[in-house]
Every structure is written in structure tokens, then in C-alpha cells.
Image (cartoon, grey):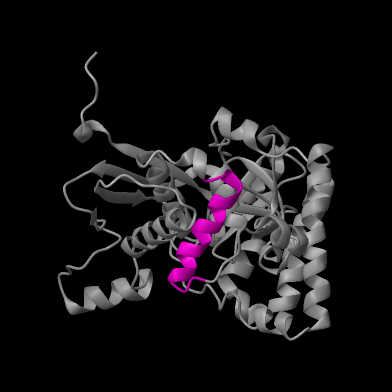
Amino acid sequence: MAAATKAEMVFERRAYARVGLLGNPSDMYSGKALSFTITDFSATVRLRPSPELLIQPHPHHDLVAFPSLPHLVSRLQNEGYYGGVRLLMAICKVFYNHCIQNNISLKAENFTLSYDTNIPRQAGLSGSSAIVCAALNCLLDFYDVRHLIQVELRPNLILDAEKELGIVAGLQDRVAQVYGGLVYMDFSQEHMDKLGHGIYRPLDVNLLPPLYLIYAENPSDSGKVHSSVRQRWLNGDEFIISCMKEVAQLALDGRRALLQKDYTELARLMNRNFDLRREMSGDDVLGSVNIKMVEVARSVGASSKFTGSGGAVVALCPDGEAQAELLHKACQESGFVVQQIKVAPSVLSDEELTSLPTC
């Protein structure tokens, strides 16, 4: 078989949407998290060699042509100003600078980057970082430097790219998307200072019970996600610090519950995670639609919490299929979409998995 030409060397990489099961938002506060990726939604980035370096706008997400001024205004109100082009540009910059700073040589060849995504916007499923993660994987393979940038550091690069754009976030989403599958994470300051990253432990996805995703197709009230919690933390607010420590502990307890397949305890922990977040942030911050999704799930006895910072909810029906049917009916009556989650497997290669630290 003839060797592939440069024009045929196309790299296409996928990153999946992320669901925070327990511990969020403590990942931004030296805490712990238990998260997994889902196959239901994903972002794909495609890299192909080209004479010049081109970041290709998406025909829908980077739309700049409109039939009228009202259409433009409506689009901005619903989708915001930003598509994926800025995300691709940011990770290119961060990747290049990292390689220069660490004496990683890069071949002098150009490429075209394009992307696609079906992750709902403003749904708390980490759509932006999925695009960045998929793009980073393309760059790692195009330049053949995957073996030179350790797995544990890749989430840092993704977060740095988003920080370039003023996106406020923690490492949880990026770790889940780099590793894929189900991951337990410890972001204690001791680990971050000593290693430059947290301690990340992949877990068997078969430990998870059936879980359900609830979201509004057209969210109208997403709240003011981070509000004053960050500043209160920095100011040493004892209530916020105490709550955040408890939220972090929920992730550790949840890991134990999963290993024991104690789903009744897992349900209790999920409810507690949301309740603590509500106490810290308040209803005005969380948004009425987000709160209603949680309450609709709880109305049939299911446990529920945000998948991220709001926009979607993950629910567990500890009483089984009959309760799940009630959940579907309640969500339908309230105008919410509900579907059983399909958990994604790990996306790391066997070589990368064996290179992970065991202690």
C-alpha cells in the first residue's frame, strides 16, 4: 500500500460533554470532584495540512451573515457573541508557548483547523473546553509530541487557553475530557504546588448506576453562575469555606459509595451537593429554570444536582425503572428534555493509561 501523502494526513479528534457527579464547584477551591464524560454530546476538531495556517469558522456557531437586523439581535441574545474560532486560536497560542518554554521542537508546517459540536450551549456540559480539548489532541498528534506532554498537564493547557479568553473555570471539566470515562480528582493545594496538577484517578464506568440528563431546550434564565462566592472565599468567609470543604468531601464519599455500589448513599450525596450550592449562592444566582429542573426530579423521589454551573441536571432514580418512568413524565409535563445518559469510555491510549502514576 502506498504511503499516505501529506494531504491525506488528516487528524480528527473528539472530546465529550462532561457531567459533574459530585464535588463541583470545589474544584475551583482546592477541593475534589467526581466527574464523567458522556457520548450523548461531543465536539469534534479536524486538522489537515495546508499551505497557510487557517482557523476555519463554523457555518453556524461563527455565523456573521444574517437575513436582517432583528435576526442578528435575536441570535446574539440566544447564543452570545462568541463561537469556537477564538477557542481554537487560544489553544494554538498556549500549545506553542508551552512547547517553546519546554524545549519541545515543532515542525515548520501549517494546517487548517475546523470544528463541529452538538453540545447544547449554556447547559453546564462544558462545551467550550470540549472544543479546546479536541483541538489540543489534534495538535499533539499533528506535531507528534503526545509523548512529550504528560497526560496530567494537558488539562492545565486547556484551562490556560480558556483563561486567555477571560473564561472563569476550574480544572474538573478539562480533566474529565482529557481522560474520558469516570474520573476522581483531588485538587488539594499540596498536590498543585508540588506537582503542578492534581491527583487524577480513572474509575470503572460500570460502577455508575443508570443516570439521567435533564435540560431545557431553550434556557431563558441561567442565573448569574459564580456570583459573589469566589470573592467571599478570597475574603475568608467562614461559611463559604466550610461549605466548600463539605462539597469536596462529598466527592470522596461518593467515590466510596460507587466502589461499594451503594446507590442510596450516592443519591443522598448528590442532593446534598446541590443543597450546599444553593445555600452558598442563593436562588437569584442559580436561576429559576435551573432550580425547577432539580425540583421536578425530586418531586418523583429522584436525586438531582447541576451537571456543572447550571443549565442541565443529572438525576439518579434509586428506586429503579418505575421511578425513571415517573421522572420522564414529570419532565415532559414541565417542558424539559430528559434522557438516559450514555457514559463515554476512557479516551486515553493503553500506553497513556499505563504511564499514569499508581500512587
| Dominant SS in magenta | helix
Q: In the rendered image of this protein, does residue 201 appear above or below residue 163?
A: above
Q: Residue at x 16, y 75 (%)?
A: 68
**Residue 153 inside the magenta-drawn segment:** yes
**Residue 306 inside the magenta-drawn segment:** no
Front residue (pair 334, 102): 102
Residue 23 in view, yes or no: no
User: Where does the image place residue 80, in percent across and percent down from the top left?
Assistant: 36, 72
User: Where does the image place residue 148, in percent across and percent down from the top left?
Assistant: 50, 42
Image position of 332 (left or right of 76)? right
Residue 324: image quadrant is top right
The residue segment tinted magenta is: 149-167
User: Where does the image place residue 156, in percent across and percent down from the top left?
Assistant: 56, 58
Q: Residue at x 68, y 79 (%)?
A: 229
Image position of 333 (left or right of 299)? left
- The quarter of the picture where the N terminus appears is top left
Q: Residue at x 49, y 54 (%)?
A: 102
Q: In the rendered image of this protein, does residue 351 appear above or below residue 159?
A: above
